[in-house]
Amino acid sequence: MEATPLRLHPGDDLRGALDAALAARSCAAGFVLSGIGSLGAARLRYAGIETPATLLGDLEILTLAGTLSPTGSHLHMSVSDSEGRVRGGHVAPGCIVRTTAELLVAWLPAWRFTRELDPATGFAELTIRKT
C-alpha cells in the first residue's frame, strides 16, 4: 500500500479529481482514507433514491470515504451547512470545491477493484481480485 496526499482547488469536481488521480497512476484499486475541506455545491444520492440531491452554499466536508476503481468508484460523504445541519450520502459528480479539499488516498498496486453485477442485490458491487 502507498498513500498519497492530494489537495484540490476551487472549482475542482471532487469525484472527477479522484477518478483522474486513479487513472493517472494506472492503478486498479484505491481507497480514500480521509477527506476534509469545503464545497460550494454538493450532489449526494440518499439511500433508496435514484436522483442525487443538490446542496448549495458554504458546506464543510466532515467525512469522505470509499473505494476507487476504473469501472466505477463508490464514495460516501457527510457535509454540514452554515447552520451545522449535516447531510450524507453517495457522492455524485458535481461536488465542487469552494476553497480547498485535503484528501489522503491509499493505492493498492497488488489488487484490482471492479464493479460487477451481483444477482443477489441487483447492483454493480465491488469485486476484489489479486493481480
Image: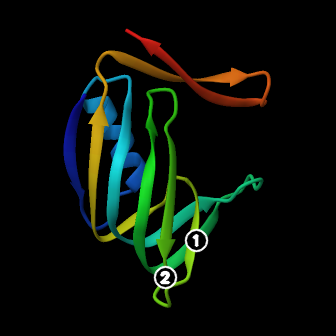
Q: Are marks 2 and 1 in contact (CB under 8 Å)?
A: yes
Q: Is residue 82 above or below residue 54?
A: below
What's under tag 1, amino acid-wise?
A: Arg
Q: Report crowding for label 2: few under 14, some 14 to 19, many 20 or more residues within 10 A (C-alpha).
A: some
Sequence-wise, which precedes: disc 2 or disc 1? Answer: 2
Give coordinates of residue 129: x percent, y percent.
Answer: 47, 13
Q: Residue at x 38, y 38 (%)?
A: 31
In the rendering, which numbered label is found on residue 96? none
Label 1: state its secondary structure.
strand
Q: What residue occupies the far bottom of the structure in this picture?
A: 83
* Residue assigned mark 1: 87
**Scheme of image coloration:** rainbow
Q: Report crowding for label 1: few under 14, some 14 to 19, many 20 or more residues within 10 A (C-alpha).
A: some
Give coordinates of residue 78: x percent, y percent.
Answer: 50, 65
In the rendering, which numbered label is found on residue 81? 2
Q: Is residue 25 above or below residue 130?
A: below
Give coordinates of residue 30: x percent, y percent.
Answer: 36, 32
